[in-house]
Image (spheres, coloured by chain):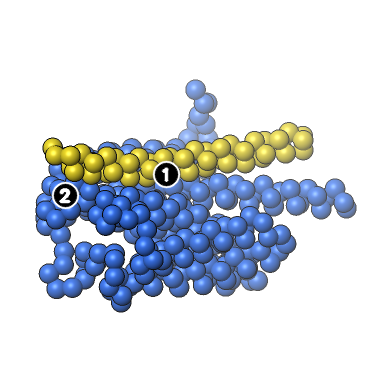
Chain colours: A blue, B yellow
């Protein structure tokens, strides 16, 4: 076991240890609650929710497809805030700018994973409901464009070199976020293949309570899962930034 | 269950499986990346000593 410092001798150190242990315990609790919510959400979607009167069993894809789309939108908004913050702070407060940049990258990458889920579960649903895997419907097309924008954002970060890379990525992140409201509104503005919005659509739209409760459980579960993955990605990026800064400092010292 | 419901069910299982493969695959990649960053930091500390 790790030796513990006596509280009366080193109160500051003990407070540090206790707060680190509290943080660890809180994260562990959050992980357990998230896993429990995912299991509960799956149970609700597969065994509690009734099958749709029109679409039948295939409608159960909604419990994964829509929450993943919603979480993707939220994380692209995280990328937008991080990108704006980076551009605002990069000259006056470089340390804070790095924090914003880490959030921006994490939001884009995790958002892209959720968006990929949407673009793979959607065609599976479409194949059974419409008889086709894909069509150039406005909702599908704008979502694909959104996905491609964030793929290009990550490719830019991966392959562009030099000090301007973060700035260019932040500008691209801001432009990319402009597509999010277009994707959201696309099936309201243009009515083609994709179904009309279930919530906030035409009069009479909505969901029966027996389906709404499983849907909301899955929304909560996927949001918690997303926050967990986003937090992990942020920690990895901060560690990467620390290593890069340390390497740069050592290189400068060895030259001097 | 009729034949259509069975096929629907298979599509639902496929969609849920794809979702979890993507999510857990990404989580595993994050784990590898975290380990690589930690090792790089430890290696640098050892060299500095």
The vertical placement of B29 against A89, above or below, is above
Percent x, y for residue A73? 39, 62
The residue closer to the viewer here, A142 or B49, is: A142
**Chain letter for mark 1:** B
The single residue placed furthest to the top in the displayed view is A1
Percent x, y for residue A158? 63, 55
Q: Residues within 10 Å of mark 2 (few under 14, many from 20)?
A: some
- Determine which residue is flagged by label 2: A56
- Determine which residue is flagged by label 1: B23
The vertical placement of A40 against A90, above or below, is above
The residue closer to the viewer here, A253 or B3, is: B3
Q: Is residue A40 left or right of residue A32?
A: left
SS at mark 2 in the image: loop
The vertical placement of A95 against A187, above or below, is above
Percent x, y for residue A170? 57, 67
Q: Residue at x 78, y 48 (%)?
A: A250
SS at mark 1 in the image: helix
| Quarter of the image where one finds residue A169 | bottom right
Q: Residues within 10 Å of mark 1 (few under 14, many from 20)?
A: some
């Amino acid at each position: 076991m790790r030796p513990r410092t006596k509280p009366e001798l080193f109160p500051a150190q003990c407070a540090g240890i206790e707060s680190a242990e509290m943080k660890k315990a809180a994260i562990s609790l959050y992980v357990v609650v998230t896993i429990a919510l995912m299991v509960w959400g799956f149970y609700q979607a597969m065994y509690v929710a009734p099958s749709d009167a029109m679409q039948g069993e295939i409608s159960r894809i909604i419990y994964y497809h829509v929450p993943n789309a919603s979480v993707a939108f939220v994380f692209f908004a995280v990328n937008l805030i991080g990108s704006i913050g980076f551009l605002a702070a990069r000259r006056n407060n470089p340390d804070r700018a790095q924090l914003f940049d880490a959030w921006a990258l994490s939001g884009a990458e995790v958002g892209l994973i959720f968006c990929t889920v949407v673009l793979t579960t959607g065609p599976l649903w479409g194949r059974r409901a419409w008889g086709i895997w894909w069509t150039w419907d406005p909702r599908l097309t704008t979502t694909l464009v959104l996905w491609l924008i964030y793929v290009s954002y990550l490719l830019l970060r991966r392959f562009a070199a030099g000090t301007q890379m973060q700035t260019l990525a932040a500008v691209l992140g801001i432009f990319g976020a402009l597509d999010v409201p277009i994707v959201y509104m696309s099936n309201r503005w243009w009515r083609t293949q994709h179904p009309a919005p279930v919530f906030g659509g035409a009069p009479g739209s909505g969901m029966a309570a027996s389906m709404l409760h499983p849907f909301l459980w899955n929304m909560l579960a996927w949001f918690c899962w997303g926050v967990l993955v986003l937090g992990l990605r942020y920690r990895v990026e901060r560690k990467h930034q620390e290593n890069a800064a340390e390497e740069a400092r050592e290189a400068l010292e060895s030259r001097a | 269950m009729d034949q259509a419901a069975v096929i629907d069910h298979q599509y639902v299982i496929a969609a849920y499986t794809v979702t979890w493969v993507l999510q857990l695959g990404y989580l595993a990649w994050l784990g590898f990346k975290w380990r690589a960053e930690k090792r790089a930091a430890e290696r640098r500390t050892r060299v500095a000593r």
